[in-house]
Image (tube, rainbow, N blue to C red):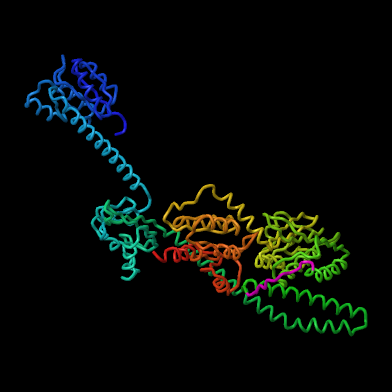
Amino acid sequence: MENKIKILLLEDDDNDALLIENILTTSDLNVEIIRAKNKESYLELLDKLDFNIVISDYTVPHFEGIKALVELKKRNKNIPFIFCSGTINEEKAIQCLQLGAMDYVLKDKIEKLIPAVKRAIKLVTETLEKEKLEKELIQFKRAVENVHEVIFYTNPDGIILYANKAFEDIYGWKIEEVINKTTPRILKSGLYDKNFYSEFWNNIKSKDHFVIEMINRTKKGDLIEIKNMISSIYDANNKLIGFISIQSNISERKKKERELQRAKEAAEEMNKIKSYFLSNINHELRTPLISILGFSEELMNEITEPELKEYAKYIHEAGQRLNQTLNNILSLVELEKKRIEIKYESINLTELLKDLINQYSKEAEKKGLKFITKFESHKISIHSDYEITKKVLSIILDNSIKFTNEGGILLSVRTEKINSFTHPVINIVDTGIGIQSEKIEHIFEPFRQVSEGLTRTYEGLGIGLTIAKQLLDLIGVEIKIQSQLNKGTMITLIFPTVAKEEEIKSEVEKRKITIVEEPYEKKSTNPEILLVEDNPGNRMLFKKYLSEYFIVDEAIDGLEAIAKAELKSYDLILMDIHLGSGIDGVEAFKRIKSFPKYKNTPVIAITAYGMTDDREKFIDAGFTDYLKKPIMRTELIETIYKYTYKNN
């Protein structure tokens, strides 16, 4: 005990009291002695203060030591009582011990008082520790009994030695019915073969901590799905003495996951049917359209009568409109089937826009609109797909002219500094009908238009911006829309940066300064994962999925991922591919893999957009695996588990 031992000394003789105080305070004992001379002061001090030990003379005027002992035991049975007397016969000594005294010491052998007090101190210490342990055990037992999870303890052979009330609530077995029974024998669902349980026991005995989702059976025979977390327990000599199992009933959660999976599969099937239908419609309409466009063009060239020539012109224009609609349908089908192949190359935006400007300036002129262009430089480079970029710009310019009846269109190209990197930016501004603020969020949904229903003002299927958005997502271009009803619309396209090496290195160094202020130390044996994802909602969802099994650190972009990877050590990295501004996931992956400590670290690519051969493409690039969004919880956990626990 670190604090002083408080001793209450009952002694009427001043010389004896001084002798006792002197021998105790000059020893190696850390004591504080408070003296009582008579019955009144003794009882007052006993009631007023807390003492660890009482030392008493056997005879005190008008009071006896035995009575002092009795009064103490009335108040606290655990405080040691030592007699220190000049004369005490054996019979009285035995009586004192029978009444609860710990020891007695004769004053002519006062030196024996020190070991007697030491024995008392040891008893006090052990008693206090025992009381503390008993109190903690009571609190722990109450806590265990009140949790909703099943908790039970077994010996190394699986014999149940303890189970909490939740075991009874979930499985229907009375606690006394399962004590000394073998698990999982009494809980077996009948759905697994012997190999399953053989592997189950091998995992339990070979790992200090094992987690599994499985199906058990209640006493009534009902099947329930549980998450079973099993930990090994060892004694002071590191000998296995048992297992503790914590189980949660996840039947409802698994039911919802299956419902979501069925809904996902149904949606995918409907998409296949829709795509098949649209493909067939496209084919059936395009065949006669060849004749309509071809013969109408011939008639326009051969007919001389003005009225008939005008009719042929209207037929040809209607055919062109139908052809454009079919092209958009085909693009939508190809996007849904992920059949669009992206061919990245270095492109000069100024050169790409020349043909488009020539075409759409003429279209604007036909409607009496101005078409103004503004370029920051004669050469602004992007790294993208030429045809996809051109198609997207065609869709947006076509819409701008279509929905503008007076005023004009401004097309501007510039560069802008965003998050320390230079990005090419295109603005297309029109003075058209604009969009109501509450409809802007729906503008990229298929078959949605500014005006809808029987009273709609403009023709078309309403899939142009849907196609544009999906194509832009494929090549990593951000699109923003600002609009006011009856005033016009501004569409902004922000292209990925073509970052210079010195820019990347400089920005990574800046990020490293903000990430940590002290040397990094791993604080857990659980696998630690770096989640690289620019979408806050996705980060929150993935972290919720994974935090139960892993330690999850986050990076909002490729630059932060590189900085954190350099400063810390992760067991696995989840790398989103499209990371907004800055560098993409592939570039971040390459740089992280260049660090020697990440040579063998699993890195899993995750992305929402791609083609059927994406897995092969990412594996060829060096990624360990590939997951396509949306990712189901079970699929994500199982994939990570495969790579983080494969050597366990």
Q: Is residue 399 visible?
A: yes
Residue 388: give x, y in percent of width and height: 71, 71
> In the picture, residue 616 is in which quadrant?
bottom right
Q: For residue 392: magenta?
A: no
Q: Which residues are magenta?
A: 339-350
Closer to the camera in the image, 134 or 172: 134
Q: Is residue 398 above or below residue 116?
A: below
Residue 484: give x, y in percent of width and height: 77, 54
Closer to the camera in the image, 204 or 57: 57
Residue 87: give x, y in percent of width and height: 10, 21
**What is the tally of numbered marks visible in this picture?**
0
Residue 371: give x, y in percent of width and height: 85, 63
> In the picture, residue 338 is in which quadrant?
bottom right
Q: For residue 341: magenta?
A: yes
Quadrant in which the N terminus appears:
top left
Question: Does residue 573 appear left or right of residue 412 in this picture?
Answer: left
Q: Is residue 581 visible?
A: no
Quadrant in which the C terminus appears:
bottom left
> In the picture, residue 629 is in which quadrant?
bottom right
- Tell me the residue at 72%/83% (across/down): 287
- Tell me the residue at 44%/66% (across/down): 642
Question: Does residue 638 appear left or right of residue 318 in this picture?
Answer: left
Q: Is residue 202 above or below residue 246?
A: below
Q: Is residue 329 above or below residue 538?
A: below
- Tell me the residue at 71%/55% (across/down): 417
Q: Is residue 30 above or below residue 171?
A: above
